[in-house]
Amino acid sequence: MECERLGFHGARLNPCGFCVGGSTGLEPGHGRDCKGSCGGRARRDCHGVCGGSAYLDPCSGNCLCERDVCGVCNGRGSSCFLLTGITPAVVPADVDVKITLLGAFSGETRDVLCVFRRRDAAVVGGSTEPTTVTAAGRGNGTSFTCLPRSFQQGTYLVTPRLSRLGKEVNNSNVILTVFNKDVGFDKMEPTTAPYRKEENKGESLRLVFTGGDVPKFPLYCILQPTERSQRPTVVPPSVLAPASHSQCHVPFQKTSGDFVVFPSLDGQHPLSRGFNLSLYATRPQIKAAYITGDGEKLRLSLNSDMVTEDKQSVVMNIGEDLKVDARRVAPPNPGPLLAAISGPTVAPRCGRLELTVHYSWGAGPVEAFAWTATRNDSAPLEDHLKALLKANSGPYLILEAEDLEMEMQYKFTVKVTADTRNTAEAAHLLTRRDVNAPIVVLYSDAILNQRPVSPEDELFLYAETVVPDCNGTLDDLELDWTVDDPRVRFDFGSQNSPVYRIAPYALPPDSNVTFQVRAFSYPTQWAYGESSVTLSVGSSDLKAVIKGGPSRMAGQGQNDVILNGSPSSGGQDPLVYQWSCLDEHLQPCYDYGPTATSDLLLKPLETNREVIRIMAERLEPGKSLNFTLEVFRTDNSSGEPGVKAATSTLVITQEEIIPLAS
């Protein structure tokens, strides 16, 4: 029924929100990926595996695949039982914790037990037995999250057990450290600081903790605003501080405020004591000053935002009079002149019609508007319309519906002139029908877009309805939105609303999409007024993104370097990933691990993953490694200009234990 109302005969709405079948030409499963998920990103690789990571080698043309930790192509951890690490590796005693096991678990997602055996033996009934904690886990075959009961203080050997077979990893050397939950620092410095990086001359605020008997593990900081309605922020261990066990590097906040800082060794549970931190705003300073090009105004630019209190502006005493060496500057480039016309496209038999010119011009107001019109039957334009258009030199054209011939389509054109070098033209189609109906006008926030809109844009369409005096008997007005392309994910919840929202990724790329809105008096749907707008949709901007920021620190221990490129292009487009690594001498990164099987740190089959994980022991200490991610669309991975995007992350290695947050 919904699709019939849009004009797609014989079509039905599928679970993904698309009209399929009938006149649409779309398959019933349109909008699903190969796993059956609506809007999913899973695609079949060159081996035909849904969600597989195999890819075509551009040199040989061969289909190459990614091997899992078991060494199996597209194995996803289903062919072996292996533990490679845990996170977090240190937790407090006597509290509930959450621990994730990483590795390969024979493809199981449920039947795995997390086993924690205490390394220091306890005497039980005259015999020595290790204390063991077990907990059920759930995961995806390569990671399992367990919620064990509280631990006693000590160190534990961690192993996974396949519960239905009793199979267990016997050669695990993964250690969980459990510390006294009552430990804490005695002091934190500083306790006050300006909230912006300009005054601090750095990218972060260094907090130093002293005193107390706290184990020497990399330190997290949990920032809790004093306004409890605001969510806390977890700051991972510093990537640049050598004494990461006693320091936190806190990013500067967007506004001033008071916080309570809780040190933490696992990022989940605070130590026993928190510390007050006040981030305050300094007085604003003049960053730039100049006289505008028209000589009428003095413009000042301050280095901080305006201060408001109770929604009223507050003038701060800056301590001295302003002293400005003002200079005259040329006006900025005004950009191109843009123009568009809004108004009804289908009008009733009577009533006043208004066409409005919308224009954008950075150099000021435009006064020259020249109107013309033609009929679609090529007959000469009526004399009274010629006289009306000739006399009108403004941005508004007022017509009476009776001025137009019934069932005749007119094309109204306006030429907007700013100067001899800057002009713009816009056109609008209008037809009068022999019905009593309201007049509706459609507006869009994209009406003056010079470039095509992007599929990831959020847009709004607005409908304004007027009932002419000559049609005063109309009541119970309704609106009905339609679209001409079934590939649009139509918002049926807005179909009868005066505001229609186009959600991100609802428009098909590289297309022209026309939205129409009709206004009518129920139940005479055939007697309607109509307005429409056509949107030119371009391609999605291709973006390469590495989760976690432009730099991080890696150290020795059980921690892995995790480089995650999944946020690229908003997680919507199916992409081909290509990773590379160069050191500070622009040489390839080499594998420094004791069990290295290749000279290169990134093996060829590892470079096409969405997420790469590198054991810290494979990184040579004291190096700066630049990891670069290039992404290509799956329909064009040739690397031609305009079809790829790149970004990079710097990883600095140290000879100490430093956990990494991806």
Image (cartoon, grey):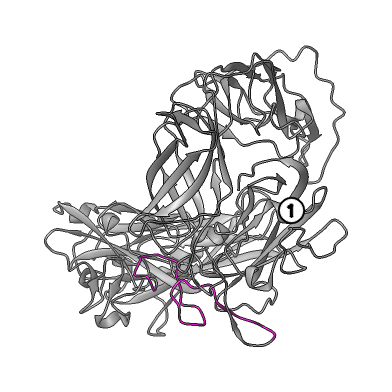
Q: Which residue is mark 1?
A: 333
Q: Quadrant of residue 287?
A: top right
Q: Which contiguous range is marked in magenta?
A: 34-59
Callout 1 secondary element: loop
- Residue 448 can be seen in this image: no
Location of the N terminus by quadrant is: bottom left
**SS majority, magenta:** loop
Up-down: is 527 above or below 468? below
Q: Which residue occupies the extreme front position in the image?
A: 126
Give neighbour class at mark 1: few <14, some 14-19, many 20+ (Cα, 10 Å): few
Q: Position of residue 6 (x, y in %)?
A: 26, 70
Write the residue at 41% across / 65% down: 40
Q: Quadrant of residue 278?
A: top right
Q: Is residue 494 left or right of residue 419?
A: left
Q: Which residue occupies the extreme left position in the image?
A: 523
Q: Is residue 444 left or right of residue 516?
A: right
Q: Is residue 512 left or right of residue 345?
A: right
